Image: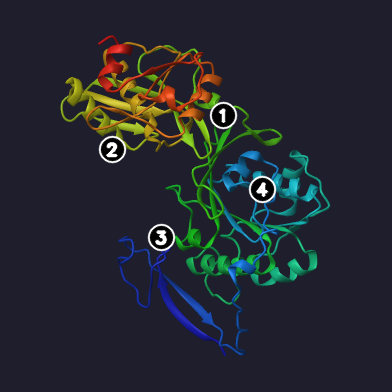
Amino acid sequence: MGKTITKFVCPACGYETNKWMGKCPGCGEWNTLQEETVNRQTATASHPRAQAVALSGISDSDIFRVSTGITELDRVLGGGIVPGSLVLLGGDPGIGKSTLLLQVADHIARTGQKVLYLSGEESFKQIRLRATRLKVNSDDIYLLNEQNIELLENYLQEFDPGFIIIDSIQTVYLESLSSIPGSVAQLRECTARLMNIAKKTDKAFFLVGHVTKDGALAGPKVLEHMVDVVVYFEGDKNFSFRILRGVKNRFGSTDELGLLEMSGQGLIEVTDPTCLFLSHGVKGSGIAVSTSFSGSRPLLIEIQALAASSGPGYARRMASGIDQNRLSLIIAVLEKIRGYNLSQYDVFLKVTGGVFIKDPSVDLAIAVAILSSYRERPLPQDVVFIGELSLSGQVRPVPFMDARLKEVQKMGFKHAVVPPGTRKSTGIGPELGLIEINSLDECIDLILGG
């Protein structure tokens, strides 16, 4: 006989307790604890004893990756899909998650592998309409409208697919749990069951996850800890461009970005991502161009700043695309080094393209963009600013300078303001004019005329 256990779980943080409380001790939120009943089955037989295997005895010749057919997604995944892995894809409703996975399923089916598409949200007719629009018509893609995960192993034995899509993890359930699909207990236990199947059968799983209004994946944080890869699919539904961002990856870097464009024929790769972040031919003060290294490739980023006289009270500091504390720090350096009266100005900063920049190499571009708007003097359009600023106003070197400057040269820029010693450490020829500066003072005198 099974034993019934009642507990209270916070869906925001996953905290569990045996009694109800008004305030969750885990996250501090009020009235979030929900009652859940779990039917624990008593063990009828002992589990087989696991065997320990020496690390040197495991062959590395069988380790490989499977391409998704979309280079940008392969980049974010670290080179492709690793068999036996769980990939969690999260994004806003209507952003294109199902479209992306249907295109991936089509490519894998063309290689001769079977794909099982378990849909808990859409009917077969809805999926068929999308497949017709994407021109996907493969005999090796099998659709399944079963939400009970306990029956999944039977279908895996029947079809033997190499790739399984669960759309979405919030709609499936286990019969042994009395809670509704999408609850904390169901999400945790279903993901654990899928992880166990993936590791035993060496099959790759793609899980679609819903997001909350704050943009985080719905469900407990343990959901992200259990899977191997977490990828966010971001973008505005009113625009065609989409961004794939790796948040967690046990098989590669988490700094990679993938850029896609939604079209009538589905998602297509953006071959020249730098064009998304630059507004060519736009003249005006407060615009500076820098480079940001994302994973394994450099991107040219446009920084836009606006300094406007503030009214009574405190001056406002607003930033979109960088940390606001970082903006305040750079403004403090400008006030200290040159005595600019920026405390009487509202300063607004925006990074184009909708990306969030953590790379310190854009510090110099942020500083000169603010000064350009403050003094209403446009910057030269053929100059790129690269360098990290110290609190004393010194320009510090940044890594991957060779790759950054090659991208600058490729995009047709004539000059680059860089930290000292750059010419010696890179193999860039004289066709790109490198202006080496030691401090922010030198940059102001050189570019803005003192």
Q: From the viewer's perspective, is the residue at label 3 or at label 1 nearer?
A: 1
Q: Mark 1 points at which residue?
A: 273
Q: Mark 2 points at which residue?
A: 325
Picture coordinates of residue 14 (x, y %)? 42, 65
* Inter-mark Cα distance, 2 to 1: 28 Å
Question: Which of the image's four quarters has the C terminus?
Answer: top left
Above or below residue 336? Residue 40 is: below
Q: Position of 198 compared to 187: left or right?
A: right
The reply to whether residue 168 is in sight is yes
Q: From the viewer's perspective, is the residue at label 3 or at label 4 nearer?
A: 4
Q: Which residue is drawn at 79% across and 68% down?
A: 158
The reply to whether residue 311 is in sight is no
As shown in the figure, which amino acid type bears the numbered disc 1?
Pro
* Inter-mark Cα distance, 4 to 1: 22 Å
* Inter-mark Cα distance, 3 to 1: 36 Å
As shown in the figure, which amino acid type bears the numbered disc 4?
Leu
Tell me which numbered mark, 2 or 1, is placed earlier along the sequence.
1
* Inter-mark Cα distance, 2 to 4: 38 Å
Picture coordinates of residue 85 (x, y %)? 62, 59
Picture coordinates of residue 122 (x, y %)? 67, 53
> Is the residue under label 1 in contact with that under label 2 (CB below 8 Å)?
no
* Disc 4 element: helix
Q: Residue at x 17, y 26 (%)?
A: 336
Q: Which of 168/112 is in front?
A: 112
> Where is residue 16, by image quadrant?
bottom left
Tell me which numbered mark, 4 or 1, is placed earlier along the sequence.
4
